[in-house]
Every structure is written in C-alpha cells, then in structure tokens.
C-alpha cells in the first residue's frame, strides 16, 4: 500500500540522524549526542514552582478540553508579556495557543500557502518552515545569511528573492542553527522591505531571552506599521519542551491579516484544543520572575565560549561565535568529505559524536556545515571535541 508523496517527502534532519546512532547504541557504543536542542536532557531543570503548578492545575481544572484559541488567562498573560517585552499594542483576541511553536508554523503555513507559493526564510533556517511549506505544496526559498558577518541576513539577497508568489517573510532571531542575534538595522531593513512589497513577517522569537552579546529586539518593536505574526513558546527559555506549548500573536494594526487569522482559527477548532492543565500551569512561568535564567545563561555562555574555542582548534573546521541560544554551526573546511551528511555519518561511526548535517537546515546556505548544541557541561563537551579532533586528524 502506498503512502502520499507529501508525507514520504518529509524530513527532519535533527531527529532523522538519531536512527543510525540508535543502531550503534544497540551494539553497546556510547554516543555523545549534540544533535537536539532540548536543555532538559542536560543539567537544566524546569523551575520547581512551574512543576508544582502543573500538579495544582490537574487538581483544580476539570481536565476537560480547553477553548480552541487557548486558556483566556494565559492569553492575557501573554498580552502583558508582549506589551512589556516588545512594546506592541495587542489584545487577547490577537493571541492563540498552539501545541508548541511547531503547530503555529504548521497552521500559518497551511493558512497561506497554495501549491507553488513561496515562503522566504533565512538560510540556514529551522527546518519546520521549509518542511511545512513543501508539505502544503509550496516552495521554500531561503535568503542568504552571511557567515563572515556572524550570520546576519543579506537584505539585498532577500529583496532579490521576493516574487509575486511570496506569501510571507520568516525572521528567526535569535537564530537556530547559527546562534546569530540580528542587528536592529537589519531587522528594520527587512521590515521596510516587507512593507514595500505588502508582505507580512513571521517573527520566531523562541530564544528571545537567551542572548549573551546584546539584547533581543523584535522587528515588531522597530516597525509599527508592518503586519507581523510573533511566534514564541515555552520550550527553551522556560525549560518546558515536553509540555508542547507555544503561541502566535497577530500584530496587525490595519486588519490585513483578518482572513489568515480566520483560517488559523478554523484549524484550531478542527484540532479541538491544546493541553488544558499545562496551559493553566504555564501561567506561573509567565507571571513569576525567571530566576533560573541568570544561572542558565551563565552556564550556556561558558559552554558556548568553550565550544567556539575548541572547535576552532580542530584542523579542518572553522566556526563563528554564537551570540544567543545554544547552537553552534561550524564549517567543514576539509575537502575529505563530499557532503556534510557524509561527514556527520563518518563522525558518528568513528568519533561517536552525533551532530546534524548543515544541509538539513538549508541545502543551499547550510551545506558544508554541521550544527552542534553546547548544552552539556564542559567535561562532556571536552570529550566530544577531543574525539572529534582525533577523528579529524586521522581522516586527513
Ligand atoms: C527557531 C525554532 N522555532 C520553533 C521551534 C519548535 O519549538 P516548539 O518546541 O515550541 O514546537 C524550535 C525548536 O527547536 C526552534 O528552534
């Protein structure tokens, strides 16, 4: 029996690489996994008051379905957060709760992309934007981000890639997989281009409070008149990836996104609701000060600096310093491997270190690179980089 082409075409490099790693683990090989952006797998723990709030929520709520758009009080708390953090003027009706940011990306793409339509995302890019675009028959197009400039977007390239089929522009800042933090100048330029071509921006801000060099600014703060959908969630900053909660905020002063909002609302109702007790409990995470964040950022900055230093010492690799999040995106300078996928599999089998091929984040601007997370402590990272180094020296 046949499955559809659209599903058989799906790939998600970050998890796909785990399959060969599992085979090795079955044979008793110990693999150091630097492939997935899940801080809870390392020494980062969900704050106790948020975990407690979930136990209380299960007792307090009726454990029935939630409203399709999401818990009202949670949406109010998000309005407060967005007004304070990004200085945008939005109401509860502009906020929807989804099963992770992933579902926001899925619903926005489904609501806008007809076969042949294009979505313009940074290259390299978080894979969901490209994969959902393809799933709905669209064509993902990437605008270049410039490695030599710490992966800042090339706005001239972005402008050149706009066509009559472009539906929206994606900004991922701070960026996964490069760890870049975009400058205000670049963000303003992107917003101006969106305004000029009558496009809206999807601004993915899931790492907004996780910066080391500088502060995150939303394009929504910098350009008040361009319609934008801000997507954000609780998987990273709040250490709740397993709760699968995210949100979209429609910042749309002139109502240009009304039909798209309606189309997203229909999908929300079709999938009934997001997890009810988790929504109730996550209000705690928004209302309390994020006391865990200082220590978390301190550890991550130390690990990021260490990863940057060690990776640059390995012959055949070069890397830019990440300014945010917990990803680093080295370039494979060595010509020993034909593709980044070949490199990643070879490193898995011979260095026993699992990373993700850069082409999984964009065949064009991601190729010849790999993504690693610097979530483990420096002892584990040190072992991983030592193993990688001796593998690279032997493979010359
Ligand atoms: C930029 C970006 N957007 C969205 C997501 C997905 O987040 P969620 O867990 O909320 O679905 C990730 C996860 O790594 C991400 O890096």
Image (cartoon, rainbow, N blue to C red):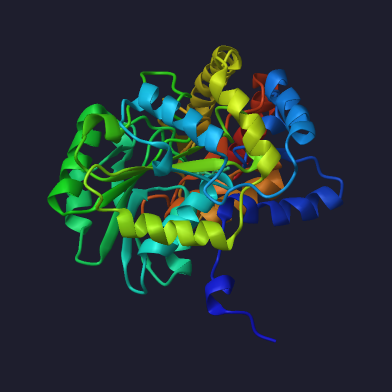
Residue 176, percent across and down? Answer: 46, 40
In the depicted view, which residue is nearer to us: 286 or 143? 286
Residue 48, percent across and down? Answer: 72, 19
Taking the image as shown, residue 223 lies to the left or right of residue 145, namely left
Which residue occupies the extreme left position in the image?
A: 196
Residue 353, percent across and down? Answer: 67, 40
Residue 54, located in which quarter of the rendered image?
A: top right
Residue 68, percent across and down? Answer: 56, 52
In the depicted view, which residue is nearer to us: 137 or 43? 137
Taking the image as shown, residue 347 lies to the left or right of residue 70, namely right
Is 50 above or below relative to 372?
Answer: above
Is 312 above or below relative to 371?
Answer: above
Residue at 42% x, 50% y: name it.
Answer: 366
Q: Quadrant of the N terminus?
A: bottom right
Residue at 26% x, 45% y: name it.
Answer: 227
Q: Quadrant of the C terminus?
A: top right
In the depicted view, which residue is nearer to us: 12 or 305? 12
Which residue occupies the extreme bottom position in the image?
A: 1
Q: Is residue 141 visible?
A: no
Is 86 above or below relative to 9?
Answer: above
Taking the image as shown, residue 28 lies to the left or right of residue 177, namely right
């Amino acid at each position: 029996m046949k499955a559809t082409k659209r599903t058989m075409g799906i790939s998600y490099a970050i998890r796909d690489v785990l399959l060969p790693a599992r085979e090795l683990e079955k044979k008793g090989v110990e693999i150091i996994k630097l492939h997935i952006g899940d801080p809870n797998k390392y020494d980062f723990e969900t704050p106790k008051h948020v975990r407690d709030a979930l136990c209380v929520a299960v007792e307090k709520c009726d454990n029935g379905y939630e409203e399709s758009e999401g818990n009202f009080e949670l949406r109010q708390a998000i309005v407060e957060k967005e007004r304070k953090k990004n200085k945008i003027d939005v109401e509860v009706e502009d906020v929807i709760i989804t099963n992770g940011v992933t579902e926001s990306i899925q619903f926005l793409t489904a609501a806008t992309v007809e076969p042949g339509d294009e979505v313009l995302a940074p290259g390299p890019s978080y894979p969901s934007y490209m994969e959902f675009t393809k799933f709905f028959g669209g064509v993902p197009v990437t605008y270049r981000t410039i490695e030599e400039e710490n992966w800042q977007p090339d706005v001239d390239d972005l402008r050149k890639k706009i066509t009559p089929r472009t539906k929206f522009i994606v900004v991922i800042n701070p960026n996964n997989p490069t760890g870049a933090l975009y400058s205000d100048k670049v963000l303003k330029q992107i917003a101006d281009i969106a305004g000029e071509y009558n496009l809206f921006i999807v601004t993915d801000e899931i790492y907004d409070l996780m910066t080391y060099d500088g502060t995150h600014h939303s394009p929504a703060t910098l350009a008040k008149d361009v319609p934008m959908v801000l997507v954000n969630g609780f998987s990273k900053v709040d250490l709740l990836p397993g709760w699968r909660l995210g949100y979209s905020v429609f910042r749309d002063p002139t109502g240009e996104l009304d039909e798209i909002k309606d189309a997203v609302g229909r999908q929300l109702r079709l999938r009934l609701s997001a997890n009810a007790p988790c929504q109730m409990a996550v209000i705690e995470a928004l209302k309390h000060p994020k006391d865990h964040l200082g220590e978390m950022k301190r550890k991550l900055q130390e690990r990021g600096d260490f990863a940057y230093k060690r990776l640059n010492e390995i012959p055949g690799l070069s890397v830019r310093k990440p300014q945010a999040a917990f990803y680093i995106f080295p370039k494979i300078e060595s010509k020993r491997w034909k593709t980044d996928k070949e490199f990643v599999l070879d490193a898995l089998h011979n260095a026993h270190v699992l990373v993700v091929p850069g082409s999984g984040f964009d065949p064009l601007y991601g190729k010849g690179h790999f993504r690693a997370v610097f979530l483990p402590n420096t002892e584990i990272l040190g072992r991983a980089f030592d193993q990688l180094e001796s593998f690279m020296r032997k493979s010359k």
